[in-house]
């Protein structure tokens, strides 16, 4: 009973102490405090997502019912996760937990190579590449590579090296844009056969094959397309 209460307080209200995240996925480096959570997560890499969002025209699907319900609230606007320290209301447990770290200063995601600690898993993953030298993001127009997707965006759009190109080019039609949100919306509204296009930079061709395999489990179906130079070169 006490265990369930602690889980409820932490998940619903963000109150309590988190366990050490000592179980790490060997495919994407995400970490978990419980082994069952790691095993559950690994199913994502196998493409197992039986819970589909019932909202009309939404193509998202999820590994578990809880995640699907959290997502469904993004459609309804329901925000039932309340911060006990201010007036913030979040639509998901994750949103509340992430918000409360602004109050507590908690940085649970720790680098195993140095003293760096972060409030989010994504920031830690990006930091780790400083140590490993991994540069999974590539420019589709030249040999430039980076450890950060945003650097690729800046390289293409702001250095003047690739005048006239669009950052995001649809693999199904001639649509192109420099806005990831516009690109995601275009895919969802016009190409329903592309499942969960939430990681739009995959379709822009800026992720290396090895890294793309790891990202697949996070919900995006990769669509292969050849990037062609506006002058006609490869």
Image (tube, rainbow, N blue to C red):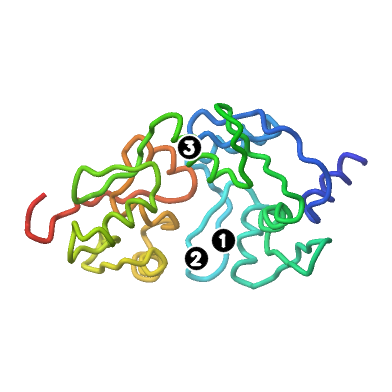
Q: Which residue corresponds to the image point at 53% horizontal and 54% vertical from the top-left?
A: 61
Q: The residue tagged with tag 3: helix, strand or loop?
A: loop
167 on left or right of 26: left
Q: In x, y percent, where is residue 233?
A: 8, 52
Relative vertical location of residue 143 with respect to residue 220 in this rendering, above or below: above
171 on left or right of 233: right
The residue furthest left is 232
Report which quarter residue 166 is drawn in.
Answer: bottom left
Please tell me which of labels 2 and 3 falls first in the chain.
Answer: 3
What's the mark number on residue 223? none
Report which quarter residue 103 is drawn in.
Answer: bottom right
Q: Which residue corresponds to the image point at 65% horizontal and 35% vertical from the top-left?
A: 32
Please tell me which of labels 3 and 1 falls first in the chain.
Answer: 3
Residue at mark 2 to residue at mark 3: CA–CA distance: 22 Å
The reply to whether the C-beta atoms of the residues labelled 2 and 3 are less than 8 Å apart is no
The reply to whether the C-beta atoms of the residues labelled 2 and 1 are less than 8 Å apart is yes
Judging by the rendered image, the residue that carries numbered circle 1 is 53
Q: Which residue corresponds to the image point at 7% horizontal and 57% vertical from the top-left?
A: 232
What's the mark number on residue 58? 2
The residue carrying pointer 1 sits among few (fewer than 14), some (14 to 19) or many (20 or more) residues within 10 Å by Cα, namely some
Q: In x, y percent, where is residue 132?
A: 43, 29
The residue furthest right is 1
**Of 227 and 174, the residue lying toward us:** 227
Please tell me which of labels 2 and 1 falls first in the chain.
Answer: 1
Residue at mark 2 to residue at mark 1: CA–CA distance: 6 Å
Judging by the rendered image, the residue that carries numbered circle 3 is 46
Q: How many numbered circles are shown?
A: 3
Residue at mark 3 to residue at mark 1: CA–CA distance: 19 Å
186 on left or right of 110: left
Q: The residue tagged with tag 1: helix, strand or loop?
A: loop
Q: The residue tagged with tag 2: helix, strand or loop?
A: loop
170 on left or right of 103: left
């Amino acid at each position: 009973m006490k265990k369930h209460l602690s889980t409820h307080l932490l998940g619903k209200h963000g109150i309590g102490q988190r366990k050490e995240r000592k179980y790490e996925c060997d495919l994407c480096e995400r970490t978990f405090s419980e082994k069952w959570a790691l095993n559950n997560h690994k199913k994502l890499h196998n493409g197992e997502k039986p819970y589909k969002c019932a909202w009309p025209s939404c193509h998202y699907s999820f590994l578990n019912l809880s995640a699907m319900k959290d997502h469904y609230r993004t459609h309804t606007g329901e925000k039932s996760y309340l911060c006990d320290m201010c007036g913030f209301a979040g639509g998901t447990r994750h949103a509340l937990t992430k918000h409360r770290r602004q109050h507590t200063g908690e940085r649970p995601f720790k680098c195993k190579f140095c003293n760096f600690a972060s409030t989010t898993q994504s920031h830690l993953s990006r930091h780790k590449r400083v140590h490993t030298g991994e540069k999974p993001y590539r420019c589709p127009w030249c040999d430039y590579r980076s450890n950060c997707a945003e650097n690729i965006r800046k390289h293409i759009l702001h250095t003047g090296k690739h005048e006239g190109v669009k950052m995001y080019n649809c693999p199904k039609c001639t649509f192109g844009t420099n806005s990831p949100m516009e690109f995601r919306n275009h895919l969802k509204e016009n190409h329903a056969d592309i499942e969960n296009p939430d990681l739009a930079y995959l379709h822009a061709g800026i992720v290396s094959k090895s890294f793309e395999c790891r990202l697949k489990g996070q919900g995006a179906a990769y669509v292969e397309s050849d990037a062609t130079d506006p002058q006609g070169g490869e």
